[in-house]
Image: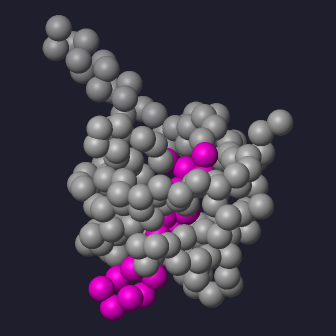
Amino acid sequence: MPERQEVLETARAAVAPEEFRAAMARFPSGVVVVTTCCEDGTPRGFTASSFCSVSLEPPMVLVCLANSADSAPSFGHCDRFAVSVLAPAHRPLAVRFATKGTDKFASGGLRTSPDGLPTVDRALSELDCTAHARHPAGDHTVLIGRVTGVRLGEGSPMVYYDRGFRTLA
């Protein structure tokens, strides 16, 4: 049996990052902007397509954040965050929040949630979350939040597929 394990480990190590990225690009997902505020009130945020529900009771979600992201230190310590589910009209905002080194909060398209966090204006839904757990996962951190508030909008979702933003037919 040890020989089989060695073969499996060799096969796992043989997956090149480009191949893995290409395989994952074929999985469509929604697009969200996740925001928080530092202790001094400075807003931080990022665009993500790795987002999903975790639990209904209690309501929980997870989002994955690259450790290299400008906002990673802020999300590593925040007590709460907001998730805004994006529509196709939010494409410029999604690109802005995905661009490293950009002032993500300078160009509008945002509003303040009842919880005091920045959220995307006219988002399909907004979730207020308290940070529940953080788990290191390779070059990312899995941030799990307990949902404390929900606001629903209207419209169709923006989808990320094959390294681009798409709309549903």
Q: Is residue 148 above or below residue 116?
A: above
Colour scheme employed for the rendering of this structure: one colour
Q: Main secondary structure of the magenta part?
A: strand
Is any atom of residue 96 visible in this view? no
Regarding residue 14, the answer to whether it shows in the image is yes
Which of the 4 image quarters holds residue 19?
A: top right
Task: Give the tally of numbered discs.
Answer: 0
**Left or right placement of residue 19 versus residue 8 in this view:** right
Q: Position of residue 111 (x, y in %)?
A: 59, 77
Give the image quarter of residue 11. top left
Q: Which residue occupies the foreground of this view, 86 or 154?
A: 154
Q: Up-down: is 11 above or below 129?
A: above
The N terminus - image quarter: top left
**Residue 31 magenta-highlighted:** yes
Q: Give me the residue at 73% from left, 62% from top.
A: 91
Q: Residue furthest left?
A: 2
Q: Residue at x 33, y 68 (%)?
A: 80
111 horizontally vs 142: left or right: right
The image shows residue 108 at horizontal and vertical percentages of: 67, 82
List the single residue furthest toward the top. Answer: 1
Question: Residue 125 location in percent, x, y?
Answer: 57, 54
Q: Position of residue 53 (x, y in %)?
A: 42, 41
Q: Residue at x 62, y 76 (%)?
A: 110
Q: What range is drawn magenta here?
A: 30-50
